[in-house]
Amino acid sequence: MEQPRSFQVWAAIAACAQREGTAVSPRHAVITCADALAAAGAGLSVARDGVPREPVLASTPLAEELEELQFTLGQGPGMDTVAGRGPVLVADLTIPDARHRWPLFAPAAAERGVRGMFAFPVAAGAVLIGVLNVYRLPAGSLAPRELLDGLVFADAALVLALDERGGIASGPDGLADAAVSARGAQVHQATGMVAAQLGVSMPDALAALRAHAYVTGQRLSDLVANVLARRVRLDRVNSSPEPGRQPSAPRAERGEEE
Amino acid sequence: MTTADRRVRDAFIELTDTLVTDFDVIDFLERLANRCTELLGVSACGILLADHHGVLNLVGASAEQARLLGLAQLQNAEGPCLDAYHTGRAVQRADLNDGDPRWPSFTAAARAHGFASVQALPMRLREQRLGAVNLFSTEPGPLDADTVALGQALADAATIGIVHQRALARSEVLAEQLQGALNSRIVIEQAKGFLAERLSVTVDDGFSIMRRYARSHHRKLTDVATDITAGRLDLARPPASRETPPVP
């Protein structure tokens, strides 16, 4: 139940990208997640400043329709995930509780044959990128293993989205550092420090940290230790002591460098 | 009723009061960790919660977060909390200098921090194992059975605080609450780092400043942290940020 689960999830995502012959991206996390959770589809919506903004990805037309529907109606488990701080897991959208909570969305989803819906925040604290929504036709809870997998897929989507934003490739090499939420408190503390240094949002700060580790060829955990010890500041990357002389504007666009 | 009994009673009344009102889970766990050190006569207490990667995260601690954080993270490889979490049983090591070969890295680190004995109490909810409460003492020696029983009661209170729905009618609620508690902790860590940089203080001081602000303004710690991370609240120059924060 520990690390191997994350690695299996990552391996499945990487295999999906390889079949398509493209670089691994958040889309592969969405597609693979739908498969792993025996879903009729999955979708990714992005949030900015803590507010859901727009659906961006869907693995099937049905998922796309339901993603759009949540935004059109302004309600649904995915919307509540962004407003709250954890996943919103709905085993059956047709029960009174669900109809009461989402009076427009729940019946509309049920009409389209979707009875189970599971919304996972694509987030680590204030680093909130969006929501991963999983749609299933039959009613029923996720099995414990499916639930854990869903959470890990959401983490994977977070890392992929951050690295896309940072303009770097999340190759298999980065996998050891990939599980953001499992990296302990230091990464989150360093993210806060970098946000203050650069005057950027928390998602941009974590994207900048990951990109800086990548372009300077360090492990994220080593960079984090240096930031916390105030040996490295990201607003003065030119004077930072590590090797890799590429003084990056940390969010500059960058191709794959491997 | 003895003085000790009264203190235990008062602690549970305080914790129960916290639970009844609209409370902040991290603030609750911090209070609980501090009460544990007082009531159980130990030097430090950490509350560790497992996430979906099976990784134990420090979600609440008595004083000296930084010291406990390192010891908490080590226990993802070895240590009493890992054992208590996996077995669902209390784990005790009365003397860290006893030559017992268990947990060599953890033992060395705990000793380097000046601890002489350690205890881990499981956090469980029915069949599910959630984490463990970690107790450290600078003196060697076992905790007596009454103290362990009281410690387990406090560990159970921590579990109830995290899973604060009265009726877990839906099996999904537990997962939602657990993730909520873990995520609250992350927001707080991010806000601590932000304040540390902004105010040129240590990360631990950043936390104290944030907590004092939350208490004096009667706001939830997590809400204050969220506002800080979103740039909606600037504690850049708090009027009283220089003084040592009061121990709760």
Image (cartoon, coloured by chain):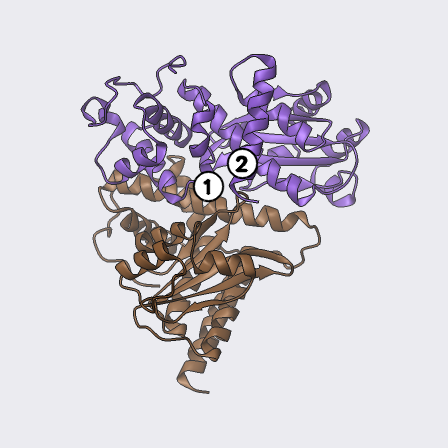
Chain colours: A purple, B brown
* B88 shown above or below B10: above
Which chain does tag 1 point to?
A
Horizontally, is B75 left or right of A63 in the view?
A: left
Q: What SS does tag 1 mark?
A: helix
Query: In percent of the image, x 57 and y 25: which residue is there?
Result: A13
Image location of residue A151, percent across then percent down: 57, 38
* B155 shown above or below A68: below
Which one is closest to the eye, mark 1 or mark 2? Answer: 2
Residue occupied by mark 2: A6
- The answer to whether residue B64 shows anywhere in this view is no
- The answer to whether residue A122 shows anywhere in this view is yes
Query: In percent of the image, x 34 and y 51: which residue is there?
Result: B70
Which quadrant of the figure contains the N terminus of chain A? Answer: top right
What's the amino acid at mark 1? Ala
Image location of residue B201, percent across then percent down: 23, 45
What's the amino acid at mark 2? Ser
Q: Dots 1 and 2: beta carbons under 8 Å?
A: yes
Q: Tell me the tag on residue A182.
A: 1
User: Mark 1 and mark 2: span between their CA atoms?
Assistant: 10 Å
